[in-house]
Image (cartoon, grey):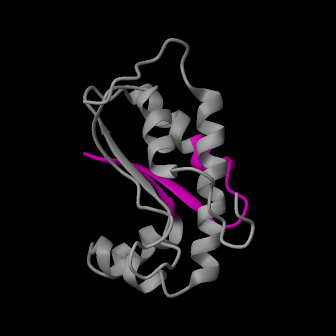
Amino acid sequence: MNRETGEASGDRSLHAKDVLSRFGFLSWFRCPLERHPQLGIVQVSHVGWRFSAPRDDLKKVFEEVANAAPRHVEWTFKAQKNWLILPLLLSEETHRNGGDFGAAQSLLVEDQDFCIAASKDLDLILAALELKVPVNGPRHVE
């Protein structure tokens, strides 16, 4: 990890997709690049996905990891059509912006200290999830 920026070595998106696919088959996945490709600034870290066959028993695993692993900012897990692990502040800003996730991200990206802290935390969350992966879990992404 780059200590200054909070960036993980390698591609976090691929790593996150790999970890989550071990819990179930993914039909949808999103994890932004650590840095904006044109602007070069650190983006607001989060991960969203949809399992082909969601299992309610997994919700507790993701909720526990989202609450326990981070060290820099507060995180939350949400499960509706899509499942999300995101900074609580991003969730609150989305609510304040009438559900506009993009507008909330645009506001928060201006706070690079927050974005760097969240980036560091997402690496911790992914590491904690790796420890919770079911033995012989699925690895195929649809």
Residue 115: image quadrant is: bottom right
Name of the residue lying farthest toward the top: 136
As drawn, 137 above or below 8: above
- Say which residue appears at 57% left-offset and 59% top-offset: 75
Residue 116 screen position, x and y as percent: 62, 72
Residue 137 screen position, x and y as percent: 46, 17
| Number of marks present in the image shown | 0
Q: Is 86 contained in the magenta span?
A: yes
Position of the C terminus by quadrant: top left
Position of the N terminus by quadrant: bottom right
Q: Nearer the viewer, residue 1 or 124?
A: 1
Residue 8 screen position, x and y as percent: 62, 56
- Say which residue appears at 31% left-offset and 30% top-offset: 141
- Say which residue appears at 58% left-offset and 82% top-offset: 112
Q: Is 89 contained in the magenta span?
A: no
Please provide the residue range marked out in magenta.
64-87
As drawn, 72 above or below 64: below
134 lies left or right of 57: right
Q: Nearer the viewer, residue 49 or 140?
A: 140
Q: Nearer the viewer, residue 107 or 123?
A: 123
Residue 20: image quadrant is: top left
As drawn, 45 above or below 104: above
Q: Nearer the viewer, residue 7 or 114?
A: 7
